[in-house]
Amino acid sequence: MTSTATRRHARTPSHDADPDGIGYRPGPLGRLGLWVTHHRKATALVWLLLVIGLGAFAPKVEANLSGAGWQADGSESVAVRELATDSFGGNASSAIQVVVHSTDGPVTEGTGASVIDEVTTILDDEPRIADVIAPQPGATLSQDGETAVVLAGAGADPNEMVRVADDLKAELEALSGVGIEVNPTGASLLWSDFNEANLDAMLKSEMMSWPVTLAILVLAFGALVAAGLPLILTLAGLVASAGSLVLINELIPVSIWAMNFAMMFALALGIDYALFLVVRFRAARMGHHETPRQAIAETMDTAGKAVLLSGATVLVSLSAVMLVPSPAFRSMAGGIMLAVAFVLLATLTLLPLVLFKLDHKINKGALKWVHTGEHRSAKFAAWGERLWKRPIAFGLASLVVLLALAAPVLGLKTAMPSIQVLPDDASARVGYNQVKDAFGDGAPGTLQVITDAADAKATATVLAADPGIAGAMPAQPASDDAGADADLVLIQAVPTVDPSDPELADTVDRLRADLPDTALVGGAAVENLDLKTQLDDSTPLVIGVVLGLGFLLLLIALQAPLISLLGTLASLLSTAAAFGVARLVFQDGIGADLLGFESQGFLDAWAPVFFFAMIFAIAMDYTVFLLASAKEHYEKSGDPKEAMVGSLAHSGRVIFAAGAVMVAVFFTFALSGPLPPKEMGIVLGVAVLLDAFLVRLVLLPVMLRLTGRAAWWTPRWLTRVLPKITFSHG
């Protein structure tokens, strides 16, 4: 018979097999965590070089990234813009219109004439501007003679024309004086003014969100040092991603919105990930009294694995936005994915090193009532017990609330943003209104029709007969250096309605059906309509791909088809409810005065497809955290009750704190700035509020209770197909 000592020796790995004294063979992430602790200098040096090297480019991010790209690639309107730029002296949708308005007599006389000359000189001196066209009676000079428009043709691509607007608008506006107002406007100015207002709002929101976030983290962690870690790590990831976007922009134009969204999204997710790891490390180190390396291995094999799978789910969800063939959407999704990847990398490599080095110092500045080793929350365990006893009552209550909030989504209307997204005093908006007052409601949305010279007469006849067209200008032949396009003509037609009026879409559809086959219809307003059509067409595909890939990733992570399906479907509830609230706020205008915006009567058309991917990514983030913890408990106990109650006891507090941080971050972005960031903040904030507190802490645990062991059942054929992933350690 072998002795007890011999048996113990047989179970315990040798020092060579287990040099860190872990007591078991760690998984891949556990080994990564241990590797980092053994190569501290190398890891720190790599991150230092990464942050400093890429961070050197970060300050250029606002100046370098583009402001446009909101177009439907391959559409008729984009073809018109390109033809107008190449063959008609830059008289395209991206051209700059400088409105000179006199409040003291005819604008073409006296001081007004001098100002028009100065405007023309400034525009002529800018090499990125093509033909400069002086005000033309009957076309760009109003009948009362008080408003004139100097047209500056686009001599560069739309992104560069936004930069031209940035560079020239202050100098042009400075020409305003007594009795004379100068306001540059047009699509390029609209984006320039919007980006400026958006940047100011983002910076204000960042300034507001960081203190609030830190306060919530201090309450969640109970210690200043521990609370500061997520912010520092997230900042490192954001700096690296900002520098990367500047470099990528040298190869492919990147929308400035990519950085704006990335800042908000990565801040929220980075804090989530760090929160999950830090709580687990403190429990292992101070609660279970493991060695520092044991604590790192356990943390990475459990919480680290959940974070990796969560990050993969986020990246997969956002990658579906790439299916929308629009540069702005692809660069925004790419920018967020890049920021999330950097934050994820920092969480899985830099954070274990920092935790190992700080060790007990992580609790410096601890609050008196805090128990640093407390991983299992008695309050959330009690909540789990309550849900276990009365699942139907709590489940139905949360379901009723979610369905009631989701109901308004059935009447949701979408359209592309109107001029109302700009502040009242923005140059582009003032000029827009002056053009509208002087030349008619549809003048700011003038249509551009390019056709073969042979079809010019037939095209003009159709335009004259269409009830949606107020008037059309004479056909303009292509410039002498147009080459192969020399037989084309451009006809500009003024619609009867404002560019944001739904009737304009009917007019464009009718014209495209009635005009000669060679005719192409475009213009800034039509580009918006074509983009909306593209978004509407892409939305079902994006939603389907996001749902399919989300379910697949959950299935791989949990190895349990039923709960993976229920977790995916539950995410739809919070998403639908968030859009239901968005309809009430932004379409119906409930709370508009409180939030400081002017309702457009619709939700911006880009919101459903883009926000769906973002909301679903966040929802699956919490799903992975909760269900990974439940699976860990089920693997250890085989007891459905322990899986449900234990998951709430161990991850409920983290989900609650992470949800509070996300809600704070998103809602601060909703309090300032133009309308689109408000939409983003409200929709994402409401989604997180509902998802974290109703779906993940009530509805999903109830589903675990009602499905019991079936939640974790896997058919044998599926276990042979799926890679083996476990969340228990040791």
Image: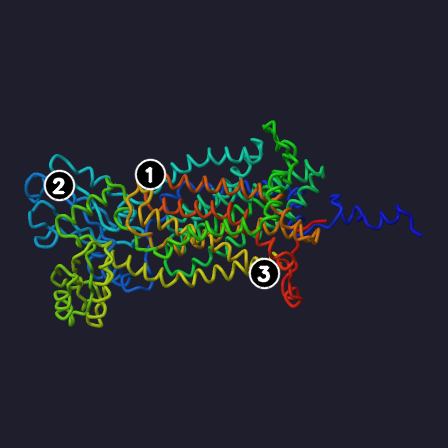
- In the image, 511 versus 590, the foreground residue is 590
Q: Is residue 456 left or right of residue 344?
A: left
> What is the C-alpha distance between the residues marked 3 and 2?
71 Å
Taking the spot 61% from the left edge, 49% from the top edge, the residue there is 388
Amino acid type at image mark 3: Leu
Residue 152 shown left or right of residue 353 in the figure = left
User: Which-is-in-front pick, marks 3 and 2?
Assistant: 3
Q: CA distance from mark 1 to mark 2?
A: 41 Å
- Residue 104 occupies quadrant: top left
User: Distance between the Cα atoms at labels 1 and 3?
Assistant: 43 Å
Q: How is the image coloured?
A: rainbow
Task: Indicate whether 455 appears above or below 355.
Answer: below
Q: State if disc 3 and disc 1 touch (CB < 8 Å).
A: no
Question: In this figure, which residue is indicated by the disc labeled 3?
Answer: 562
Q: Say which residue label 1 marks.
A: 594
Q: Could you tell me the amino acid type at mark 2?
A: Val
Residue linked to disc 2 = 115
Q: Is residue 154 left or right of residue 223?
A: left
Q: Residues within 10 Å of mark 3 (few under 14, many from 20)?
A: some
* Residue 451 at x, y percent in the picture: 19, 68
Within 10 Å of disc 1 (Cα), the crowding (few <14, some 14-19, many 20+) is few
Which residue is pictured at 25% across the width and 62% down the height?
A: 80
Q: Secondary structure at mark 2?
A: helix
Find residue 325 and report its image quarter.
Answer: bottom left
Number of marks present in the image shown: 3
Residue at image position (35%, 48%) is: 584
Q: Earlier in the sequence, mark 1 or mark 2?
A: 2
Q: Secondary structure at mark 1?
A: helix
How dense is the environment of label 2, judged by Cα within 10 Å: few (below 14), some, or many (20 and up)? many
Q: Which x, y percent locates residue 273?
A: 55, 44
**Which amino acid type is marked by label 1?**
Leu
